[in-house]
Image: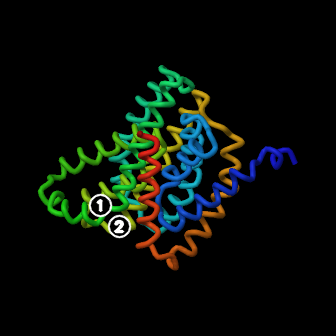
Amino acid sequence: MTWIHAVNWLYSASGFAVGMLVGFTGVGGGSLMTPLLVLLFGFHPATAVGTDLLYAGLTKSGGTLVHGRNRTVDWRIVGRLACGSLPGTGVTLLALAWFGTGTTHMASTISLALGIALILTAVSLLARTWLLARLAGLSERLTDRQTLALTVMLGLFLGVMVSLTSVGAGAIGVTVLLVLYPRMPTVRIVGSDIAHAVPLTLVAGAGHWFVGAVDWPLLGSLLIGSLPGIAIGSHFAPRVPDRVLRPLLAVTLFIVGARLVF
């Protein structure tokens, strides 16, 4: 069949490996897949980001259905985040269309932003417990209006960062939401973050498609490998020592991020 010949099984194997790690750790695939496509396979940063955004939107749609059925999504938080992220996404996409995604300058800009996002993600993974302890009293002093404003601002930051790098909606977003909503169960924070990531990544991915920064055969190859990888990783996650795997992953992301920045 024609579609079989279009599949690159090396990309599918990489997608499977990334999917396994996502299932094991819960870290967003963009933190792993995008730098892999840029540094190992040599894809243009804009193409890697655009393809990964649609990949993330499709894979997280299933997660949103599960969380929604289990009533572990706070749609109020999703709406607040979207009020900031969707305008941020729109502005970022307009900037990409205006300056062009194929230029050397834009490639350098995206690589720099990707490196910064990876470093922030690594810090979120390594220092989450410390940060939550240090900022535990912050939310107690915030009014409802201030919490609303900060949530919208977080959404704006995520909209720009995710549209530019495909990274940030997972570890960074969850960490900040845990600070802003400390009384909310973690599973509802995670479910709300995943639900918000679906429209964000799909809209951003569609924008990248519009400016020609999506590789469809690559997307298909990644999905063939990553979907079973995520399922298997999620199944065996309780047996994996998170206290070992998560720090190793964070250090790896930090090194890759530093490589892109410097």
Q: Secondary structure at mark 2?
A: helix
> At 52% across and 73% down in the image, what residue appears?
237
> At 79% across and 44% down in the image, what residue appears?
6
Label 1 sits on what residue type?
A: Leu
**In the image, is 106 to the left or to the right of 213?**
left
Local crowd size for mark 1, using a 10 Å CA cut-off: few (<14), some (14–19), many (≥20): many
Label 2 sits on what residue type?
A: Thr
Percent position (x, y) of residue 76?
34, 53
Which colouring convention does the figure follow? rainbow
What residue does disc 1 label?
Answer: 178
Percent position (x, y) of residue 84?
34, 40
Percent position (x, y) of residue 250?
42, 59
Residues at marks 2 and 1 touching, judged by CB atoms closer than 8 Å: yes
Q: CA distance from mark 2 to mark 1?
A: 7 Å
Q: Split into 4 quadrants, where in the image is the C terminus?
A: top left
What residue does disc 2 label?
Answer: 186
Q: Quadrant of residue 48?
A: top right
Q: Quadrant of residue 205?
A: top right
Of 170 and 207, the residue lying toward us: 170
Q: How many tags in the picture?
A: 2
> At 54% across and 40% down in the image, what residue appears?
49
Q: Of all residues shown, which one is farthest toward the right?
A: 1
